[in-house]
Image: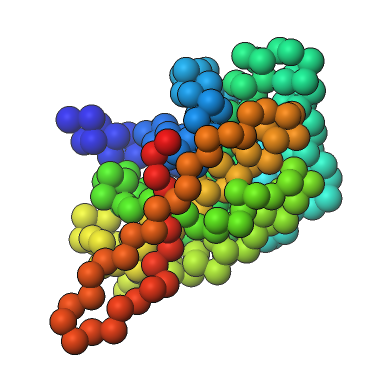
């Protein structure tokens, strides 16, 4: 019933900058990203999950406007990067000054940055899509979220310093723009938008949404970790990714390129 209600909500409400990903996706994204964190930080954020989710909804209007201008163009302007860094500055200040609970909520809210930057719909801009396409894309994502495997997109991202985050954020935009044309090809055929119910895990559009989600999970954890380390937070007992290799059929050559998957702490 919950899944049906979520899908209905996505169908009725056009995506906006205030809430691009479905609400359930943001909750799942937060929980999956926490699996990549040191156990203490994962617990602290988990205890404040509802506050963190509320914080993500209170995205600063100036950043909403900046993203609306930058993402369709494919490049984060220096002033946008400065504004994003100011958000991380404030979190570090709060944590170092001993305002731990407030700082943790603000830290959790930073997840909204990589989430939006990883969304292939937003990096093209709503004006770039045929009417109804984004509705079907988000409906496809919502209907298949619990079937999508979460993989560690880039293990090296988890070791980035805070000063390196702008490069990571820009890379999310670049990769989303590379994959966005697949959505147009798969979801708009013969002059009509394709109903998401006609697509399954074999669809390239499904693959794009799954990759975007894993990208957001990894970049979200990387953003949290970079800020937490600079605030001198505890980084012990950090989980290691568990590499999963499917068994190859008889006579087939095994593929060792499968990316590692996050392992719960």
Q: Is residue 137 above or below residue 112?
A: below
Which image quarter: residue 228?
top right
Q: Quadrant of the N terminus?
A: top left
Of all residues, the one furthest to the front in this rendering is 236
Q: Quadrant of the C terminus?
A: top left
Q: Is residue 199 above or below residue 126?
A: below
The total of numbered circles placed on residues is: 0
Q: Tell whether 165 sits left or right of 148.
A: right
Nearer to us in this view, 170 or 60: 170
Is any part of residue 111 visible from this angle?
yes
Q: Is residue 155 above or below residue 250?
A: above
Which image quarter: residue 66?
top right
- The colour style of the image is rainbow
Of all residues, the one furthest to the bottom in this rendering is 251
Residue 30: % across, % down: 47, 34
Which image quarter: residue 174?
bottom right
Is any part of residue 120 visible from this angle?
no
For image coordinates 51% across by 53% down, the residue present is 215
Residue 56: % across, % down: 56, 29
Residue 104: % across, % down: 62, 22
Residue 166: % across, % down: 74, 50
For image coordinates 39% across by 58% down, the residue present is 243
Nearer to us in this view, 129 or 39: 39
For image coordinates 53% across by 21% down, the residue present is 44
For image coordinates 28% across by 44% down, the residue present is 146
Nearer to us in this view, 38 or 187: 38
């Amino acid at each position: 019933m919950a899944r049906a209600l979520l899908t209905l909500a996505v169908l009725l409400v056009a995506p906006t900058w205030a809430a691009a990903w479905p609400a359930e996706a943001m909750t799942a994204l937060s929980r999956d990203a926490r699996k990549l964190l040191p156990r203490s930080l994962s617990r602290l954020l988990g205890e404040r999950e509802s506050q963190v989710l509320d914080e993500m909804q209170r995205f600063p209007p100036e950043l909403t406007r900046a993203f609306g201008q930058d993402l369709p163009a494919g490049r984060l302007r220096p002033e946008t990067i400065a504004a994003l860094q100011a958000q991380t500055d404030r979190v570090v200040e709060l944590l170092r000054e001993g305002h731990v609970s407030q700082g943790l909520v603000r830290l959790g809210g930073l997840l909204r940055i990589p989430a939006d930057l990883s969304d292939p719909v937003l990096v093209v801009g709503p004006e770039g899509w045929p009417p109804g396409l984004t509705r079907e894309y988000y409906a496809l994502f919502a209907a298949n979220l619990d079937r999508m495997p979460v993989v560690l997109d880039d293990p090296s991202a988890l070791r980035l310093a805070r000063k390196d985050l702008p490069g990571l954020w820009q890379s999310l935009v670049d990769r989303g723009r590379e994959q966005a044309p697949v959505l147009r090809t798969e979801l708009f055929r013969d002059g009509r938008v394709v109903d998401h119910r006609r697509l399954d895990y074999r669809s390239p559009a499904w693959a794009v949404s799954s990759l975007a989600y894993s990208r957001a999970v990894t970049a979200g954890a990387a953003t949290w970790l970079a800020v937490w380390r600079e605030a001198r937070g505890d980084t012990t007992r950090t989980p290691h990714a568990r590499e999963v290799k499917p068994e190859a059929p008889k006579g087939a050559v095994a593929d060792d390129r499968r990316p590692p998957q996050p392992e719960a702490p």
